[in-house]
Amino acid sequence: MRKVAIVFLTFVIASLAVQIELHDGQVIETRIVKYEKTQVLTDINSIPRDEIKSMVFAQILPESTGVRKADQDIQRLLDMAQEEKRKYPEAKGIDLLFNLEVTLNDDGTRSYSYRLVYLILSEARKEVATFKASFLEGENEVNIIFGRVIKPSGRVIELDPSTIRIEKPPREDIVFFSKDKWVTFTLPEVEVGDIIEYSAENIYYNPWNKEVFHSNFYFQDEDPASYLKYVVKVPSEECIKHKDYNMPEGSDYGPIVEDIDGDKVFTWIAEDVKSYVLEPHSPPTGDFLPKVEVTNQPDWDEIFNWYAGFQKERMKVTPQIQALADSLSEGALTDQERLACIYHWIQQNIRYISIKGAVGSGVSGHPAQITLERGFGDCTDKSILFSTLLKAINIDAFPVYVGTNNLAPLLDPEIPSFYGNHCITEVFLPDTSFYLDATGAESGGYSRYPSFAETNHGVYAVNAQKRKVELVPIPSPGQELRHYHLDMEIDEEGVLTVNYQSFYNGNYETVLRYYWNYFTREEDRRLTFEKMIKHDLPDAELTDYDLVNVGDLDKQLSLKMSYRVPDFVKFVGPLAIINLPDVQSRFTFNEVALAERKFPLVYPSSEGIQHHINLKLPEDWKVDWLPGEMDLFSDELKYKASYTIEQDNLIRFEDDYARYTRLIESWRYEDYRKLLNTITNYHQKPILVLVGEK
């Protein structure tokens, strides 16, 4: 479903007449409507906005008729709706028309306007009748041009202007300070089968940076579309770069480039666009949908200068910051140790609160000293303070902007723009550089140095002060490793006794430590351990447990537990059938359930898993069959596994799973799926043992 409330793109209404009614009763008809600050320009005159009561858009009939009739436009839309319903009988809704226009003015102000005509074919799509667009006083304004509901009978219900509201957007699950507001309305009496139509404009009369212009548009959605039009209008002397992505083979959406009244106008048009079906574990839609990106920046210099100017002002080492940096790093012998001390302190002592407002806070944060005094800040604030504390101990570090891999499309460095939904830190030591994320918004501040949140892995980082744009490396599987060690023994009655210990690195350790510290009370921990072992072994009985270093961020987290499982072994005649606990469920890969994929399969990051398992059998039992060795590898992963028999009836199992990449292209998916299924099938094979007399 097209998210029309995101008003950063807009439209041209061609083939329509506009009837403007003023508050004094005067009615004006025009074929041209141009929004310019406080005025509406027509082909007749200029009208102050506050004098306009309403605007009605109607189809212009062929010149030979010499008439303009709104009901003709309604009938045309009703006919179109019937045709599109026949074409897409399973659709939940259809974009009959989505026209968008972006205008960059000579003075750097810009407007975003659009008209949506949408056919509602399910209860789920009735929400499209609710319009929401954000504005920030002093920066932009949102104007509703018109809205209406068209019933299948042809009856029209106009939007009542008195129902347009200004609201404060709700914030859930996070403390959030923001000055932005919503303009919102819901079209009345909407039912399945109705056509809804509305038009609005968003005018940025005070954009963050008037020199930088960027826009984009997606040519596919969860609903099919009959007609999509994207127009970008800029002054004729403006430098414009545009690039398209993922366009269907054989398509030609444009652009058509024209010179109109001293402006350059770029137009893209797509017709009869089928919907897409989102697949599980797909990347952000911007990475695979057809789209266009537009910028007026030939390179990153303007953005680097602007960002760096904000950051340098805010990274002042004050006496208080110097004293804190010295205190935190006291006793540390190396730069790595000093880094770790400050990294852990920032995460756990400066509370994450999202602060959005003017450009100084929204883009480049508050001064480090202010964030320290407040004890809270957003991701940019925390990165600035972290970088400044490191500067105080002579370690170079800089805030960098990233688009997290779970939400933002991957940046194309060829299209410079205001990029990113998050801010982290790049650190430079004499022989290396790397990234850290001191925010702790999703992890409670429990990333153990040098790990950092996996949502930053494999994305582009914009370092303004170093004047570079580069990919954040994906950690090696060893840096994201989970290691499981189990010492087990089976008695002659088939009872299994297990001593278990696990060790963690990377994001998995971060999430676990956050869970155990934040979501579980100490008195509930035993119950949590019991749930863990009973997930795969319902009859298991916990005998002991321990959390090692759960409260010490400087040391590796480890979980320990002991348990017994009655009737663990399945006896079939003289054979005992044994499946190793834990391992099989860990190597069940639900992400490859689909037989094929159209879009890439993505993970948050790399992954490493190792098992070391010792299984002691009764003396008079004899191993009859063990699974053989496994040694698999591909461009994406490798896996080795082996069983061995040692003296005293000891079976040893060891394996090493390493996945290096986080993205599996659709053309590689079939081979990758076979590889994972081979691993799963391997662990479904049991150990067979001949038992002595019972």
Image (cartoon, helix red, strand yellow):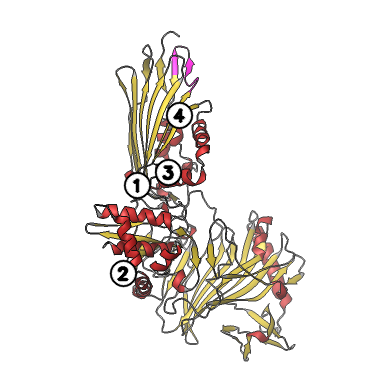
Residue 564, horizontal then vertical, whole percent:
47, 24
Badge 1 marks a residue whose secondary structure is loop
- Range covered by the magenta-colored residues: 565-576
| Residue that label 3 marks | 670
Q: Amino acid at mark 2?
A: Arg
Under circle 2, the secondary element is loop
Q: Which residue is mark 1?
A: 554
Residue closer to the observer: 658 or 665: 658
Query: Which residue is label 4 attached to?
Result: 544
Query: Are discs 3 and 4 less than 8 Å apart at CB?
Result: no
Label 4 is placed on what type of residue? Answer: Asp
Q: Position of residue 365 (x, y in %)?
A: 43, 68
Distance in Å between CA atoms under marks 4 and 1 = 25 Å
User: Type of residue at label 1?
Assistant: Asp
Q: Identity of the amino acid at label 3?
A: Glu
Above or below for 609 versus 580: below
Instruction: Measure the C-alpha gap from mark 1 to mark 3.
Output: 42 Å
Is residue 575 placed above or below 332 in the rendered structure?
A: above
Disc nearer the start of the sequence (4/2): 2
Please name which of the two marks, 3 or 4, marks the residue nearer to the observer.
Answer: 4
